[in-house]
Amino acid sequence: MARNHLVGLLLGTEEDWPSAFETVMKRLDPKISYGGETHTVQTERITIEPFDLRAVPRYGLVIDRLAHWYYVPREWLKKVALMNDVYLMNNPFTFQSMEKHAAYAAMIRLGLKVPETWLLPSKKPPDNPRFPYTAARYNEPFDLDEIAQRVGYPLFMKPFDGGAWVGVTRIKDVDELHRRYDESGERLMHLQASVENFEVFARSLSIGAETMVMRYDPSQPIHGRYQVEHGFLAPAVGREVVTIGRLVNAFFLWEFNSCETLIKDGEVFPIDYANACPDVSLTSLHYYFPWAIKSLIKWALFCAVTDRQMQIEMTMKRYFDIGDRTDLSYEDKLAEYGRLADEHFQTERYQDFLETYVPEIDEVMLEYVAGAGFDRLLVETVRSTFPAHEHERFIAHYRGLLALWVKDQVGISA
Ligand SMILES: Nc1ncnc2c1ncn2[C@@H]1O[C@H](COP(=O)(O)OP(=O)(O)OP(=O)(O)O)[C@@H](O)[C@H]1O
Ligand SMILES: [Mg+2]
């Protein structure tokens, strides 16, 4: 029996990764004999339209890049998750309710080294006629300076829900503290202790069961932030960073997310890990772009063909039961979380599946990235991203990085 799976792409302005994803999927043209059926997979870009809540979608799996700011697709995703068992890589319910603040709270309970963090009442009160009465009765006056003292300078003031560095400032003294707080208006802000003089900023990108840890330099312009560097973390620290990323994703039911950690004196401090629409553009990821596309394809194939069920309900208690134990060290807890994450992501089954049913994926990806079609995509992406006088320089820059990736792959398989 033949079964076709339709992978839907819910897209905004991006053209680079979708085009790579579609091309590689087409070249792979999977015909996988699994569970007594022959599975084929196609991709399609989803259009935005009014929808009947009872309509049955044609998609088996959807990769969403749009719902974090556009509400029509957001509500469509919730409907297809609740009613039609469409597989979504990021749970739309937790994505919406577990913003940065909730993510900090949950990870603190699990024992992660989240820097000291306070939530402040907004500078400008909510515009609500009930506020003056409520505030007069219940709002305690508070001393902002004292809270900042407790957190310690320098500190970061940042929005409780976060995203794209908007409203994030590093504050050195009392004057700046008040100025920034005054500017924050109605937005709820955190004060967070700064991890100063860290040795490494590690940003990990997770796609399903796979996680890539990359060295990141936030002081660089976008094209230079991800460093091509291997072995920049001691092996045990590397494993810790990977486990933290996987824990966050398994806990929140996200499968396409990035996690930021700062490493200082061998300790790992997670600072940001609720980015369920992570940057995967060619111009940011460059060397790591093929890894991201390949991982997306592998995870999509695994989920579609094996009929992996998307999990809607959270299983927080399983994690808290470990986090709350006083007889376990931080390391013991991480090991337990790692086991839960492996179980959640079906890590072993995923790897077996790929080896057995998609052994050609590395070769197909390599051929694609080394070929003319990919080079055209690279050139077009640079042209649409940078001003004209920079095209030549950046085309050479990215070609060099991708050629390095190709060379490294040939080295691995030799
Ligand atoms: N506690 C901290 N210690 C040191 N640096 C920090 C801390 N918090 C934030 N930063 C710096 O500020 C940057 C932005 O902060 P954060 O990642 O929390 O905000 P964001 O708006 O979620 O960013 P994005 O969504 O783009 O990742 C970080 O990449 C880091 O360079
Ligand atoms: Mg961040």
Image (spheres, grey):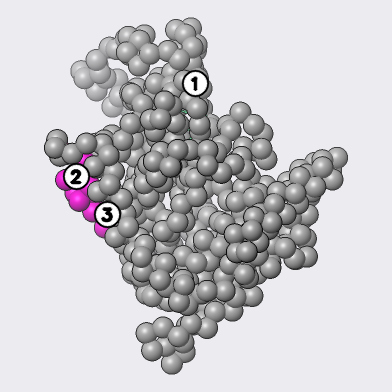
Mark closest to the chain's N terminus, 1 or 3: 1
Q: Which picture quadrant has residue 370?
A: bottom right
Residue located beneath label 3 in the image: 340
The residue shown at (46%, 71%) is 354
Q: Report crowding for label 1: few under 14, some 14 to 19, many 20 or more residues within 10 A (C-alpha).
A: few
Furthest toward the bottom, the residue is 1
Mark closest to the chain's N terminus, 2 or 1: 1
The residue shown at (39%, 53%) is 254
Return the x and y of residue 62 as percentages of the image width and height. 47, 65
Residue located beneath label 1 in the image: 197
Q: How far apart are the alpha carbons under marks 2 and 3? A: 10 Å
Q: Which mark is residue 322?
A: 2
Q: Main secondary structure of the magenta part?
A: helix
The residue shown at (60%, 51%) is 288
Residue 82 magenta-drawn?
no
Mark closest to the chain's N terminus, 2 or 3: 2
Is the C terminus in the top left, top right, bottom left or bottom right quadrant? Answer: bottom right
Return the x and y of residue 119 as percentages of the image width and height. 33, 25
Q: Is residue 136 above or below residue 264?
A: above
Callout 1: SS: loop
Q: Is residue 50 above or below residue 152?
A: below
- CB contact under 8 Å: marks 2 and 3: yes
Q: Check disc 3 and give the amino acid type.
A: Leu
Q: Check disc 1 and give the amino acid type.
A: Asn
Magenta-colored span: 313-324
Question: Is residue 384 something one can see in this rendering?
Answer: no
Question: Is residue 330 something one can see in this rendering?
Answer: yes
Callout 2: SS: helix
Q: How far apart are the alpha carbons under marks 1 and 3? A: 33 Å
